Structure formats: C-alpha cells, structure tokens
Image (tube, helix red, strand yellow):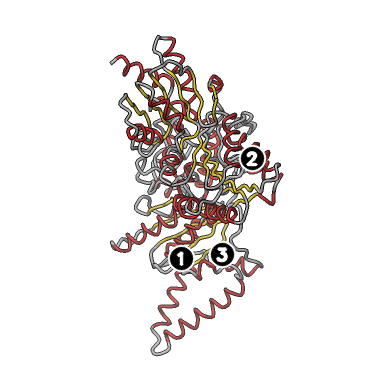
Amino acid sequence: MYLEKINGPADVKRLSPTQLEQLCREIRGVLIKTVGKNGGHLASNLGAVELTVALHSVFDSPRDQIVFDVGHQCYTHKLLTGRYDRFATLRRAGGLSGFCRPNESAHDIFYSGHSSTSVSAGLGLAAAKKMHGDSSYVVSVVGDGSFTGGMVYEALNNGGRSGARHIIVLNDNKMSISENVGALAKYLAVIRSTPQYYTFKASTERTLRKIPSVGQKLVKRLYDLKTDIKNKIYAQSNFFEDLGYRYMGPIDGHEIPVLIDALQAAKAVKGPVVLHVLTQKGKGYPYAEADPSAYHGVAGFSVATGSAPPPRTDFSSQFGALLCEAAKDGAPLCAVTAAMGLSTGLQAFSQQYPDRFFDVGIAEEHAVTFASGLAKNGCLPVFAVYSTFFQRCYDQVVHDAALQKLKLIFAVDRAGFVGEDGETHQGLMDVAFLNTVPGVKIYSPCNYRMLRADLNTAVAADDGPVAVRYPRGGEDARTAALHCGDVAYATLETDGTEVLLVTYGRIAGEAVEAVQTLRGAGVAVGLLALNQIKPLPAAALEMMLGSRAVYFFEEGLRSGGTGERAALELLERGYRGTFRLTAVPDEFVAQATVKEQLKAYDLDADGMCRIIRDCEAG
C-alpha cells in the first residue's frame, strides 16, 4: 500500500503515474471509510483526489504554499502531508480538523472554513513573496461554487495586474464558467496546457525581440493576432484574461498526467494564472456520484449501502415547515438563502413558493442587502443563514437593514456550539454582534413551541429587523417542564426563591435538570429561561432584581453577550446581590461533540449544579 509510505509530499514525487493512480484509489478507500464512521465532507473530497495528488507532485509544499478555499476539500492534502497515521481522528476532540488548520501542520497555510477567501489570501501571500524576492509559488484551489461569492471577484480585480506568481486552480465540479465549442478549441486547450507550449512561446518571443528595429513590433503583432484568433474561438472564455490572468484549460481533473503537465505549464508563466480543471463530485463512490448534495456534509453512513440513519426532526426542518405555514396567510413573505436552502430547511418552501424563493449563491453580504431591497418595496424577506456565516454580514445588517428600520427576519441557524466542524463554524458570536446594532430584536427559543411563537411575533412586528436564532439538532424534551406565561420568557419553580438560574436557548433543557437536581438536594433555586434576549424583558429584569443571587449561563461569547447586558442593566438599577456569569471566554472553541463542548464550558446540568452549589456553600 503506497499511502502508508507517504510521510510527506517528497514521497509523492517518487511515484510513477501508474503508482499515483493506485495511490488515488487507496486514498478514496480511506476517505469513504473514515467519513462513513466520523462524518464530514465526502463528495467534494472524492472529487479533488487526483488534483491534490498532482499538486503535491508538482509543487514543493510548504515552501510553495497551497491555499484551499473553504477547506472542506483538503482531506487528501492531509493524507499526503504526514497525517495519515492520525486520519482516523478526523473531526474528533483533539484529533485532525475537517478543515485547514495552520496550528495542525505547516502545510495548512490558512484557516479556511468559509467560502471565497482563497484568492484574496493567495494574492496576499504571493505579493509578500514578490516583495521579499521569493521565487516560490502560491496556489489557490477554489471551487466553482465559491465563484458565486463577491470576494473572489474583488481579489481577481486586484490581482490580475499584480505580476505575482499566483496560480488559481478553478476546481469546476458543477457549473461551467466557460464553454468552448469545437475540435479546434479542444485542441488549443490541450496545447495551451503543456509546458512545451510556454517554453516555445517564451523562446520565440526572445528571438523576435533580438531582431533590430522591428523585433518588438513583431512580438506585439504576433500577440495581437493570437489574441484575435483566441477571442473568436473562445467566445466567452476571456473574462480572466481581460482581468490580466493567463487562462488555461479546461482540462480533465481526474487524469493525473494531464494535470501534472498543466500545473508545470502554469509554473512556467511569469505572472498570475487561472487553471480551469473539470472534476466530478463524489468520484469513485457510486452513491456520492449519483447524489453529491446528499454526501456534501454527512454525519456518518453505511459504506456498503450508502445509507445514513433517517433524518430526525430538528429546528431547521421545523422552521421550514412553519415558514410554509406563514406564507399561506397571504403575507408577502419571501425566503432568501446563500446556497444553503436544503440545510436550512427551505426545500419545501422553494417547491411550494418558487417565485418567492431566492438562492443568491455563497454571497451572504449581498443576501442581506437584497433582502433589504425586498423589504423596502413591500415584501417580508426571511434570510435563513448559519450563525457562523452570518458574521460576514455585519455591515449590511447595520447599514442596509437596521439603520433604515426595514422589516425583515434573520433566521439564524446553528446558533451556539456546532460540534465537530470546530473553530470556523461555531455559532457563538451572533448575539454579541447583534447586541451592538440599534433596533434589532433577538429571540432564542428553547423548543419548537417557542420557535413557532417567535416566528409569528416576528411576522407581526411593526418594523425593524428581527433575529430568531436556534441551535443545530432537535428540541430538548426537558424544556417541556417550563411554564411559558409570556412569549418573552418561561419559568420553573420561581415562587419564594432567592436564587435564580437564568439562561436561554438550547441549554434551557440543561438548566431544567440542574434546578430539579439542586432542589432535590435542598438548594432552593428557580429558573428563568429567556426567549426574548434583546431587548431584555422588563418583567425578567424585575425577577432578577428581586433575587439575592443570579447565576447566568450563556451558550455564547461572554464579551458582548446577553449575560453582560443583563449585568449592566441590573447594575444601573441598583442591584446589590450576587451576579455570576458563566459563558464562553475570549477564545475560539475547538472541535468536539456538542455534549463535550457544553461540559468543557460548564454549560451542562452538571456544571451548572457544581457552580451554584459551590457558590452557595461558600
């Protein structure tokens, strides 16, 4: 087995093309087996196997820097850079990350959990190398899906005239950026993707320039003639070259000899290059080939049958169903997604109301401003977005939505801990940044009943943005014990108590168990489970003011969170009791299961009990 002998990219370079093909088969077997057990991103990684092998055959990582966009296509890269022996720990606590992580390996150049960043990062790396006189290369590997994000075009506009040795590998596994027609076009694509072409071209130009008087004119005339012919054949392929890039391809991304030749050719170009590579998502695993979307991100499955455990009802699917109900009432309700319609529960809405469903691509910033435009002209837009990706929209929320007091709803999915996806995907910052935006209301339901109430409240709101945030996964059955006398909050065992546990969202279920355990041990404590967390309900603040001790637990950042806001408001009202806040400190949260993450930060029932018991005893 070749893979077992790969300790780094140098070992890849020693293999023949035939051996490299066998290596690719071995890699696919490991990918399918590991993701089947641990979960992760499968289809995208299966499609990038030959491309990654070819990259490490041609370039000298980490001196030559390879930047993977999003990073969910980097599993083969990990296997080829000395991490095969730890690959079974993928996405486990203390194990390998499912994304590029610089503190894991010198070969992981840039954190990359969000889309459309690799071209900007790669350009910056290449510009720095140019300034330092470093002749090594930078390669940005970016999927065609990331080209729906505007940041890519900002970088392309900036980088085309840079002269930096920056190679952009466009991994096209779905949509065709350009369509070349005819046998001659295909022939030219092959010719332009060989090192010999660029060597001959450079030699010819040097020879012509030596001709006295007319040499430079001949070079320009030859260039103009070549460009004119190319423009006629590649009718729609000149976008990159118009920006200043040398465009090469498209080529077969599963033919290693072709890939190696093309990458060598790209190295011969003294400036920025776009190499267009055609790949197939899910390549080598029939189930993933047939339905790559289903195998994009999976929680685990049977390798033999391709079957996964049946999906359970969760907050995302419940939200989608409730949105369909709300749309039936005749309200001009629209749903907006940034290429996440399926995972945010909007599939049914898109089928029932196709004229009111808008998928804007991986362009969260545009989505908010687009939704603001819908709102301005009388629609009620609902933007469903993961908390981690919502971070990208801060300016648009402030300037285009809140400042103009436009009525729109932010459905913030995956709020709180997300588990195995790790640092780049935790949903721990949305409350902190929304707390700084004037006029935004925030709801954080702990169960489906409250989710329904929150969506109805948001639809009926007079004006201004409303955020409804909810976690990954389903509701906690323990929250059924809560008494919901008001949509703003719920309570449990608060009569006559001087100690109050306050929380919101998913961990309300943990708080119910903690209160029941403490009361069983003789510690009189009540529970206030907030649902409206901005602005804080006046009645909830009165309950806290009437308590001798308030223990606030928050599944979010401590700095700027609801707990800090509550502490400030209590202080301003003259509160003189004990206030203890337990939340996520000033750090990024590493991968683990959600259960492990809650335990690590004392946000599970055991942690709540211990903190309250110790403080009350002391």
In this orientation, does residue 256 appear? no
In this orientation, does residue 428 appear? yes
Comes first in the chain, label 3 or label 1: 1
Quadrant assignment for the C terminus: top left
User: Image point 43% across, 15% down: which residue?
Assistant: 496
Name the element at disc 2: helix
| Residue 269 drawn at (x, y percent) | 43, 66
Task: Quickly name the residue at label 1.
Answer: 157
Name the element at disc 1: helix
Q: Give the numbered dot on residue 323.
A: 2
Going by the image, does 465 lie left or right of 569?
right
As measured in the structure, the alpha-carbon distance from the residue carrying label 3 to the one carrying label 2 is 50 Å
Name the element at disc 3: helix
| Residue 200 drawn at (x, y percent) | 46, 72
Quarter of the view holding residue 188: bottom right
Q: Nearer the viewer, mark 3 or mark 1?
A: 1
As measured in the structure, the alpha-carbon distance from the residue carrying label 1 to the one carrying label 2 is 39 Å
Q: Nearer the viewer, residue 536 or 504?
A: 536
Q: Give the numbered dot on residue 190.
A: 3
Residue type of the residue flagged with mark 3: Val
Residue type of the residue flagged with mark 2: Leu
